[in-house]
Amino acid sequence: EIWTSNIVIKSHAPILEFIDFSVSDASGNNNGRIEPGETGEITVTIGNNGSSDAFNVMGDLICSGNYVVVNTSAQSYGTLAGNDVVQKTYTVTADASTPEGYQAMFDFNIEADLGVTGFGNFYLVIGRFTALILDLDTKNYSGPGIYETFNDMGIFSEYTTAFPEDLDLYKNVFVCLGIHFTGHVLTQSEGTLLKNYLLNGGNLYMEGRVTWSEDPVTPVHPLFNINSEDVAWFQYEFIDGIPGTFTNGVSFEYNGQNAIGQYALAPIENAFNIFQTQESLNICGIANNAVDYRTIGTSFEFGQMLDGESPSTKAELMQLILNWFDGITTDVDLQNYTGRSNLITSYPNPFRTETTISINTHIDSDITLKIVNSQGQLVKILIDNENTSSGKADVTWDGKNRYGNSVSSGLYFGVLKSDTETEIIKLIVK
């Protein structure tokens, strides 16, 4: 007779898996994030989900991109028995020129004897995202316009109509509350969330047609240093910047819904006026520098302004706002940048590999020439407090940062400081 029998033999093998990661910056500012220019630690947890040992397990952390460097080479996790979990720590450094909110992508490769492998990946935000548009307005009159402005500028931002889980992921939050009758009334709990965000070092722009006068005061309102003053009814037709501030020279035609007001804003203490209506000269925008945070409050909707000629475009105004919000990060002040310079020129500009910056000094002076990114953060020092006789001098920038890495394409500034003058030139890397 002939018959067939079957047998089952259970094979045991390791299954190596990436489980999780955590971040520490205890040697830096210890805020739980890796900031531009900071070195931190990433602890990677892996495990063996199989039923036999994995021998000589190695884990290699790799980061793609130009800004973040992994300082630790592949590490040995030893022998992992079935269901074992092991952690190892890697140090990483973010370049000082890393844009805020940059998403660094990491791959984690696992190898062991007998050809056993595993893989995982994750991304880590360096610093904080540039902006969140928190559009609480039920009609969404302004929020989409702000979001579109960031897109036009090539700046990553997030748009939401509800509070996110963690406001501290964002350097700047733009809150839209809307107009009469249909606008959102900020609740006490929402005001507390925004207050805590500011006290943790954030910057807050908040617009609302009635929030500064008729709506209840929440915990965040006093941090704007804004009072309201009853005035005769007026119309928002044109909105002008205020001379002597970072909005100097801007003027916008306004196309908002129900564009009528009955109160003006008034600054308290260190706050100052930044916007007024053109006809009635009623203040409708105030900025406040509290050192640890900065705020802007307006009674009109940013997204309803109409672009005019430079410098009166929403993108240019938003850059002025971001520069002012970020003005305390370095000694470089871009808020008065006009786009023109009498002391420095560059050619070619835009450029890909290098540009020559020509300096025309009027007197003998010690000068410093720095390259900064659009957030005001130092990229490279080309001239460091050197004496230059009056006349013309040329210096070449090769498009690299102070660590010798090529910068990404985008907008940069050359900032020239002498004993008596400061001049800024726009540099575009293609």
Image (cartoon, helix red, strand yellow):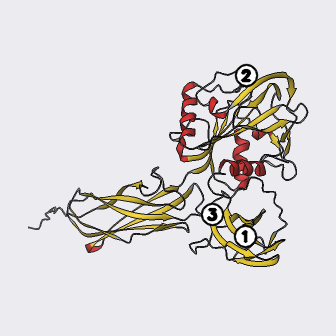
* Quarter occupied by residue 374: bottom right
> Residue 6's x, y, as percent?
15, 62
Q: Which residue is mark 2?
A: 181
Disc 3, SS: strand
At x 76% / y 30%, what residue is drawn? 266
Q: Are marks 2 and 3 in contact (CB under 8 Å)?
A: no
Amino acid at circle 3: Leu
The mark lying in front, picked from 2 and 3, is 3
At x 14% / y 62%, what residue is drawn? 7
**Could you say which is closer to the camera, residue 311 or residue 141?**
311
> Residue 218's x, y, as percent?
60, 26
Q: Which residue is mark 3?
A: 378
Q: Earlier in the sequence, mark 2 or mark 3?
A: 2
The mark lying in front, picked from 1 and 2, is 1
**Could you say which is closer to the camera, residue 366 or residue 286?**
366
Q: Earlier in the sequence, mark 1 or mark 2?
A: 2
Q: Is residue 219 visible?
A: yes
Mark 3, residues whose alpha carbon is within 10 Å: few (<14), some, or many (≥20)? many
Amino acid at circle 1: Ile
